[in-house]
Image (cartoon, helix red, strand yellow):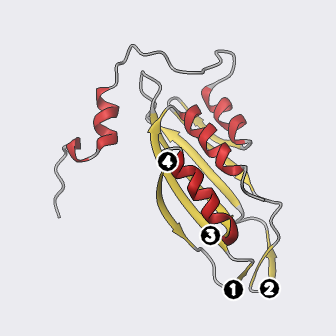
């Protein structure tokens, strides 16, 4: 299947390409990098920081989950990033996090209400107790706005 290199099919890309490059980056504290602010809002730790991109990890170590009867901690986290930061302060923002099955609906509701697209909800493991799911989501906007919206959704998690 051939897909033309034409972004007219994607409303986000059209907006991204049309951005006015003289627009001021919203809510930036000049004393702290945007990556540090992104991590602080999400209450996570920076795993990679490059010009125009950033990756952050957030543990959910408070969860008590077993897989096949064995307690696990290493897989219970979220990963968040932004990349392609343009002159107007917008970027592609991506997120993935683990949620308990009974947290899923409230978490998704807040993300959707805040205009964040849900790209996947799935399990990674079998025989997990309690049941955990992974949620993938994305947006194109100012990374700090994205981080605030995700942080709001995290408030419904245990």
In percent of width and height, residue 82 lies at 52, 40
Q: Work out whether mark 1 precedes mark 3 in sequence or the reverse, and give the earlier one.
A: 1
Q: How far separated are the C-alphas under marks 1 and 3?
A: 12 Å
- Give neighbour class at mark 4: few <14, some 14-19, many 20+ (Cα, 10 Å): many
Q: Work out whether mark 3 precedes mark 2 in sequence or the reverse, and give the earlier one.
A: 2
Circles 2 and 1 in contact, beta carbons < 8 Å? yes
**Residue with the mark numbered 1:** 127
Mark nearer the viewer, 3 or 4: 4
Q: Work out whether mark 4 precedes mark 1 in sequence or the reverse, and give the earlier one.
A: 4
In this rendering, position of residue 22 left or right of residue 102: left
Q: State whether residue 47 is above or below residue 40.
A: below
In this rendering, position of residue 112 left or right of residue 68: left
**Residue with the mark numbered 4:** 116
User: Residue, x 64% and y 83% (percent of image)?
Assistant: 126
User: Residue, x 63% and y 37% (percent of image)?
Assistant: 148
In percent of width and height, residue 83 lies at 48, 38
Q: Which mark identifies residue 69? A: 2
- Give neighbour class at mark 2: few <14, some 14-19, many 20+ (Cα, 10 Å): few
Q: State whether residue 130 is above or below residue 152.
A: below
Q: Secondary structure at mark 4?
A: loop
Circles 4 and 1 in contact, beta carbons < 8 Å? no
- Give neighbour class at mark 3: few <14, some 14-19, many 20+ (Cα, 10 Å): some
In percent of width and height, residue 5 lies at 19, 45
Q: Secondary structure at mark 2?
A: loop
Mark nearer the viewer, 3 or 2: 3
Q: Work out whether mark 2 precedes mark 4 in sequence or the reverse, and give the earlier one.
A: 2
Task: Decide which of 53, 129 is in the foreground and name it.
Answer: 129
Q: How far separated are the C-alphas under marks 2 and 4?
A: 35 Å
In percent of width and height, residue 108 lies at 57, 58
Circles 1 and 3 in contact, beta carbons < 8 Å? no
Q: How far separated are the C-alphas under marks 3 and 2?
A: 17 Å
């Amino acid at each position: 299947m051939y897909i033309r290199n034409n972004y007219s099919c994607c409303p986000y890309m059209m907006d991204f390409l049309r951005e006015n490059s003289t627009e001021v980056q919203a809510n930036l504290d000049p004393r702290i990098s945007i990556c540090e602010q992104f991590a602080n809002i999400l209450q996570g730790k920076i795993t990679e920081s490059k010009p125009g991109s950033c990756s952050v990890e957030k543990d959910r170590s408070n969860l008590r989950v077993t897989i096949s009867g064995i307690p696990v901690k290493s897989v219970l986290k979220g990963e968040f990033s932004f990349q392609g930061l343009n002159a107007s302060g917008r970027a592609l923002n991506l997120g993935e996090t683990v949620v308990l099955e009974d947290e899923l609906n409230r978490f998704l509701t807040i993300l959707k209400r805040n205009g964040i697209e849900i790209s996947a909800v799935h399990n990674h493991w079998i025989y997990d107790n309690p049941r955990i799911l992974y949620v993938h989501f994305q947006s194109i906007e100012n990374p700090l706005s994205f981080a605030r919206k995700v942080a709001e959704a995290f408030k419904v998690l245990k």
